[in-house]
Amino acid sequence: MKLRIDTRPNPFEFGTEFAPERLVDREEEVELVVRTAINRGRLFLIGPRRYGKTSILGAAEHKLEQGDR
C-alpha cells in the first residue's frame, strides 16, 4: 500500500485573526454583531476556543468602518 501525502494547504489557520473576506458562512453572525453595535445593544459572543469569535468581531468592525451596513 502506497501512502499519499496531501500537500494542499490547510484552510484553517489557528492563532491568527482571519481577514473579513476569508470568513466562510458567517454572514448572519457578522450582521448580528453590526446591528447590535449600531443599536448600542449588548452582545455576548460565546463559543469554544478557535471557533472564529475574534474574526467575526473583526469582520463586523471592518463593515462598520467601511459604512457597509
Image: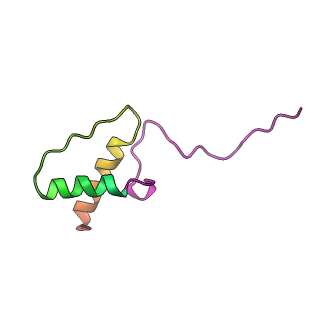
Q: Is residue 4 magenta?
A: yes
Q: Relative to 68, say whether 13 is above or below.
A: above
* Most foreground residue, 26 or 22: 26
Q: Position of residue 59 (x, y in %)?
A: 32, 54
The residue segment tinted magenta is 1-26
Q: Magenta part mainly helix, strand or loop?
A: loop
Residue 32, quarter of the rendered image: bottom left
Q: Quadrant of the N terminus?
A: top right
- Residue farthest left in this picture: 40
* Quadrant showing the C terminus: bottom left
| Residue 39 belongs to magenta span | no
Residue 63, percent across and down? 27, 61
- Residue 8 falls left or right of residue 52: right
- Res. 62 visible in picture: yes
Side (left or right) of 11 relative to 27: right
Q: Is residue 59 visible?
A: no
Position in image of residue 22 (x %, y %): 45, 55
**Residue at image location 16% in from the left, 54% down from the top:** 37
Q: Residue at x 38, y 42 (%)?
A: 52
> Residue 56 in the image: x percent, y percent?
33, 49
